[in-house]
């Protein structure tokens, strides 16, 4: 984030800061609390529904998931199209992606983003 954003958050009292000799600093504990609050807000936003910026979103069914310790390859059937996405194994596990699960493949340029339908 930009220094202007941090400056506005300090002025709004969202994070505590100290100024000494013309230099503004934020205590590490306060910065960690701010980071945690930003993560909580992002989690609430995700719970309200995805806000993905992608031109093509195709609903489909996961047909295969191949995982190793680091990466996962997720294959989907989206109508007549076969979509393949590479993501971290952790992300595939968190999304609960496995054959038969309904999901959305969001395509933007050369990236494929997979979201689980609920």
Image: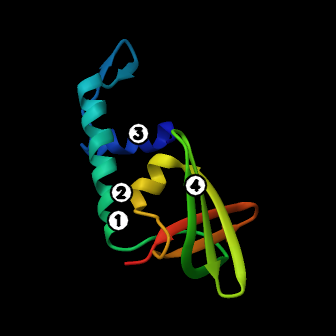
SS class, disc 2: helix
Q: Quick check: 82 left or right of 12?
A: right
Q: Which residue is mark 2?
A: 42
| Percent x, y of residue 70 | 54, 40
Name the colour scheme.
Answer: rainbow
| Percent x, y of residue 103 | 50, 75
Tell me the residue at 61%/81% (across/down).
58
Instruction: Give the residue at the far bottom of this rendering.
Output: 79
Viewer-nearest residue: 60 or 56: 60
Q: Of label 2 and label 4, which has the lower sequence position? A: 2
| Percent x, y of residue 10 | 31, 39
The reply to whether callout 1 and callout 2 are in contact (CB within 8 Å) is yes
Q: Nearer the viewer, mark 4 or mark 1?
A: 4
Q: Nearer the viewer, mark 2 or mark 4?
A: 4
In space, the residues marked 3 and 1 are separated at their CA atoms by 21 Å
Name the quadrant containing residue 73.
Answer: bottom right
Q: Which residue is mark 1?
A: 45
SS class, disc 3: helix
Q: Of label 4 and label 1, which has the lower sequence position? A: 1
SS class, disc 1: helix
Viewer-nearest residue: 55 or 1: 55
Q: How many marks?
A: 4
Q: Which residue is mark 3?
A: 6
Q: Of label 3 and label 1, which has the lower sequence position? A: 3
| Percent x, y of residue 72 | 57, 51
Examine the rendered structure and indicate whether residue 52 appears above or below residue 90: below
Q: Of label 2 and label 3, which has the lower sequence position? A: 3
| Mark carried by residue 66 | 4
The reply to whether callout 2 and callout 4 are in contact (CB within 8 Å) is no
């Amino acid at each position: 984030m930009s220094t202007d954003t941090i400056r506005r958050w300090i002025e709004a009292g969202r994070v505590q800061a100290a100024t000494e000799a013309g230099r503004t600093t934020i205590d590490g504990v306060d910065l960690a609390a701010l980071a945690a609050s930003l993560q909580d807000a992002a989690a609430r936003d995700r719970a309200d529904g995805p806000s993905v910026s992608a031109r093509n979103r195709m609903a489909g069914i996961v047909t295969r998931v191949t995982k190793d310790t680091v990466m996962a390859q997720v294959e989907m059937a989206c109508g007549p199209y076969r979509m393949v996405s590479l993501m971290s194994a952790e992300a595939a596990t968190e999304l609960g992606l496995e054959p038969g699960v309904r999901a959305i493949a969001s395509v933007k340029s050369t990236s494929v983003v997979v979201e689980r339908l609920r």
